[in-house]
Image: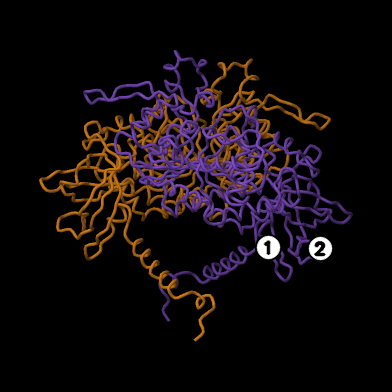
Chain colours: A orange, B purple
Amino acid sequence: MLLPLSISKRPLAHRLFQTTWRTAKAFKSTTPENVAGILRWEPSETVSGVEINGYVRSVRAQKKHHFVSLGDGTTINSLQAVVPADQAEGLTIGSAVRLHGSWVPSRGQGQSHELQVQRAEVLGASDAKTFPLQKKYQTPEYLRTIPHMRPRIPFNTSLLRFRSEVISSLTRFFNSREFVQTHTPILTASDCEGAGEVFNVSSGDEKPRSVDETSKSFFRRPVYMTVSAQLHLEALAQALGNVWTLSPTFRAEQSDTPRHLSEFYMLEAEMSFTSDMDSIMDLVEDMLRHVATDLSETRIVQELSARSTEGLSDMASVDQVQRRWKGIMREKWPRITYTEAIDILTASKERFEQQPVWGQDLRTEHERFLAMHVGKGETPVFVTNYPRAIKAFYMKTVNDDLGTAVPGETVECFDLLVPDFCEIAGGSMREHRLETLMDSMRLHGIDASAEKITSSGQPTVSNNNLDWYLDLRRWGCPPHGGFGLGFDRLICYLSGIQTIRDTTAFPRWYGRCDC
Amino acid sequence: MLLPLSISKRPLAHRLFQTTWRTAKAFKSTTPENVAGILRWEPSETVSGVEINGYVRSVRAQKKHHFVSLGDGTTINSLQAVVPADQAEGLTIGSAVRLHGSWVPSRGQGQSHELQVQRAEVLGASDAKTFPLQKKYQTPEYLRTIPHMRPRIPFNTSLLRFRSEVISSLTRFFNSREFVQTHTPILTASDCEGAGEVFNVSSGDEKPRSVDETSKSFFRRPVYMTVSAQLHLEALAQALGNVWTLSPTFRAEQSDTPRHLSEFYMLEAEMSFTSDMDSIMDLVEDMLRHVATDLSETRIVQELSARSTEGLSDMASVDQVQRRWKGIMREKWPRITYTEAIDILTASKERFEQQPVWGQDLRTEHERFLAMHVGKGETPVFVTNYPRAIKAFYMKTVNDDLGTAVPGETVECFDLLVPDFCEIAGGSMREHRLETLMDSMRLHGIDASAEKITSSGQPTVSNNNLDWYLDLRRWGCPPHGGFGLGFDRLICYLSGIQTIRDTTAFPRWYGRCDC
């Protein structure tokens, strides 16, 4: 029989070697190399030659053996290892070690196998007396003073791992929809949301900034840290079509609440060539439903929910968290107008601290009521078409009458309310008509220069730092819209953790910027 | 015959309608909805009912018809549409339009089909006289003054789309390796790279910052914009294992070169439990090879390389760009030590402006020579083990003698050099031994408090803002290492664009922060 040339030409020894090598490699790869993998591994007989890295979570010393719990960040659970006393030196809490041993079917309770250690290497020693993460209960407040150590607490590790899974699931979602991922700028010359709430940026060797000295500063103009990628995202949508970004945003608000950070990630998306706000809300729904469906069965989510059952005060109950996930996975979230919302609130028998009044923003107590009653405490609820005066200048003015007496009094926008947590996302159609946008800017007290093009057709220099945003409307601006979602709030909501300060490794808020 | 209940209960008309609707939808979905899709679509007969959105790139008016080139950002190419004169009103350059018509096999040159338009809708008008992106050649310098319009130029659109593809390819790579994606902080209290090069951050209503007033400032301490995620990434690696991030970083350098930005994206990764720097270099190689292999056959890359053939001065030649891609896809990039590099440079007949001297950093001319000769002008080259004094304080001191006479004189680090472009990435093993790290900090003039734990075992307050980084070594620090890669430089290198200012939509550099 003729073998194909490429095979017959090879010397036999080489082929044999290849085969052997492949088998050996395949065998080796079945030996798990991390704690998550090894805990799922249930061979029927003892397997020797196991090597595993990790940190000592606790030690129980007995005469002949030390019982060591080992964690490595791949799972919230620990590996139980039995270490001969003569190998246990330096295996103190917190130390980084490599254990060599056998994976043996266990006769004890708990895990099905245990690691019987032949040799232990200490790769990074730990002073057990001063180790700041002791086994006893430590308050979240204390742990926030050591953000560089806090991620090593198994639950916090899992939370960060969950954060990573959500990023990755979102990336898959937007890829599948052919949205272009963009990097919007952090430094910006646009301070459209009011200078009181933004951070200023200056270079290290600059003298304190004043208006006169601006021309000598690093950027020769005042520069701020972005509060939202939206305006830039609109420019990109006009070039690329549908776009998205997951970028850091900043607010210099002096608020000290579990729902606010000074630095936080915003997921923002913008859709081009659409005049239908339902398409934006559909996108938000589809995206969140994708993430929940994608991740609900994963190990990491199960590990997080296990923590809820402990009934700790910094966690929502396991029932609450399950309701949140189920609510998101349910189809067709209610969509009501602001005007309908006011009617529902007014007609209800609930006693609010402040009575709802058309024209004023909804308060947290109102949003909570709507989430609980319209969404039945499970499904998120869209509230649309708020009064123009209480919403941002860039939102599209409603032309036809959607439940209000005066046309033009509302804007095409939505807030997404979720039970327990209230607002998690907001979006709108953007005002794409130049004249109406300038009108809206004047209404909001923002300087909008009426004409920047001189009669010669040459652009003039203007002090208005939103001129560029107006420009987008001068040359081919199709109807478009988008949304922003507080990414850290989403992590809070899905994980059940009660404060946003624990969703990110290095939280920054008023008075706090550690590390 | 009995039908299942759920079907038999439905009225027949409803079922028929459903079927019809489904067929209609399935048919509709095969009609491409964007320019990239329609240009690939070659039905043998005329298909009516086509609807397409986009921007007018150019118009040629004739008596009965106007010939319109339409682009929508999905491809660098334009769709040719034939519009009856009575439908052509408002179809000016730059305008956003929706064309309704038939896709007809074309008798002309160029594309196989053309869009014969029955009806044209102007969704966003454009004043052709003032439209800033005229068909004639416009210099890159001019275009950088209108960053909010520039992405609409077909080549710049493609560049941003390519950027998105690279992000997505990197995300897939790190997912497949089970690296955890992390969000490292932008605001930081650590100014480890020298205060002269960092941006300071203050809140809007603060008085100009001085040392005395720091305690009254927003964060009650000086806060900077991060220059690198590495230090924080090390803390996370100690909890999560292997980690990565693609985050904005900032340098307040007053440099005005095509290779530097004040705001740029850094791809950084950190591997835990490794003492072998080859594993870090393997990761860099595997990652870049993955991206190149993943994307080399994509349409977007072919479109970008077409631009190189035009021989524009702002682009590398098509040969150059192809050599770069091939070089990256080649296996086993050379790895030489700094000492070997000095030997090669000294032995060469090349006339350098400055002669290479052991102990001094390599200059651009030296790096270029090494990339051209060691990597044969194609493969990237790793240069490892630089002298300790010219590298960062956190790099691991070499214990054994790797080509130098004095042990301890070099550090385990690498720079990755590529042809034409020099340094694109750098990495190192991190000094994980507390005493050696403190020694190294003193050598680099960084205050390292010798002892922060008092005899009572309580941590003391210290002014050293890198105490937290030292802490990582106090309690279980395994050997680890990682790298950072300038993401914008990578986009430059792979796309062939000559300046980093054109790789991102809104570039910021000394004196420039538009929009």
Foreground of the two, B434 or B48: B434
Q: Is residue A110 above or below residue A456?
A: below
Specify whether disc 2 shares its chain with disc 1.
yes
Q: Which residue is label 1 attached to?
A: B40
- Rendering coords of residue A59 (x, y %): 19, 43
Q: To which residue does mark 2 refer?
A: B109
Q: How many marks?
A: 2
Q: Residue at x 14, y 48 (%)?
A: A65
Q: Residues within 10 Å of mark 2 (few under 14, many from 20)?
A: few
Q: Chain of mark 1?
A: B
**Mark 2 secondary-structure assignment:** loop
Q: Is residue A383 visible?
A: no
* Residue B486 visible, this orientation: yes
Numbered disc 1: secondary structure: loop
Taking the view exactly as shown, the residue that stands out farthest to the right is B63
Q: Position of residue B150 (x, y in %)?
A: 69, 40
Determine the residue positioned at 70% across, 62% down.
Answer: B49
Type of residue at label 2?
Gln
Residue A388 against residue B289 in the figure, above or below: above
| Chain identifier of the residue bearing label 2 in the image | B
Using the image, determine if residue B454 lies above or below residue A66: above
Image location of residue B92, percent across then percent down: 79, 46
Residue at (73%, 35%) from the top-left corner? B141
Residue at the outermost top position: B212
Horizontally, is A109 left or right of B475 in the view? left
Residue type indicated by callout 1: Arg
Is disc 1 surrounded by few (<14), some (14 to 19) or many (20+) residues within 10 Å?
Answer: few
